Amino acid sequence: MRWKGSGRKVSVPTVENYLKVLLDAFLLHRVGRYDIKEKQALSIGCKYYVADIGLRDYLLGNAKVDEGKILENVVYLELRRRGYQVKIGKIGQEEVSFVVSKNGETAYYQVVDAGHDEEILSKKRKALESIRDHYPKFLLSIDVSLDVSNNGIKQQNVWEWLLEKM
């Protein structure tokens, strides 16, 4: 199998080799998936986060700006800085941005850059509501006015969360 991009053909082994080099150089972080319902790690569907957002911007330029992915990357880096082990959560067909653990404690984080878009917030909230255990659940949004609890989910402004002292 070969991938096409910008008119060039790149084989899957070549991409895997590049990813390995970037991981070994600590420029990328590979994050595995975790099935929340079945309480088990999944072997497929990992995500990659860059260690330095500035490097991402340099490589991709302004043409490839996706604020939601950048915000998720920033939250991932902060969770790691706070000492958490981080996985990507899966509950049924829904994704939870992060399942984190530290010192035997677990929590769930959903990151959304939708601001006041109630449809998107509702969808992200629904994924957290479908989790039937009693671990803390957080919905982090760029919405400036967001700092409430709803059905056991603490909704918080992501900028305020980033500034919390830990």
Image: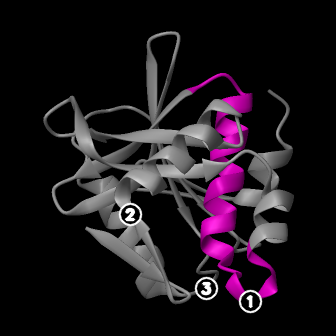
Residue receiving disc 3: 116
Bounds of the magenta segment: 60-84
Q: Is residue 147 left or right of residue 53?
A: left
The spot of residue 111 in percent (x, y) is 55, 60
Residue receiving disc 2: 11
Q: Is residue 158 left or right of residue 159?
A: left
Report the mark closest to the observer, 1 or 3: 1
Quarter of the image that includes the C terminus: top right
Asked if residue 43 is positioned above or below residue 91 in the image, the reply reads above
Q: Callout 3: helix, strand or loop?
A: loop
The spot of residue 127 in percent (x, y) is 31, 60
Asked if residue 53 is positioned above or below residue 109 in the image, the reply reads below
Looking at the image, is mark 1 or mark 2 earlier in the sequence? 2
Q: Splitting the image into 4 quarters, where does residue 81 fall? A: top right
Q: Nearer the viewer, residue 80 or 154?
A: 80
Q: Residues within 10 Å of mark 2 (few under 14, many from 20)?
A: few
The spot of residue 45 in percent (x, y) is 31, 52
Q: Find residue 63 and name its label.
A: 1
Q: Nearer the viewer, residue 40 or 153?
A: 40
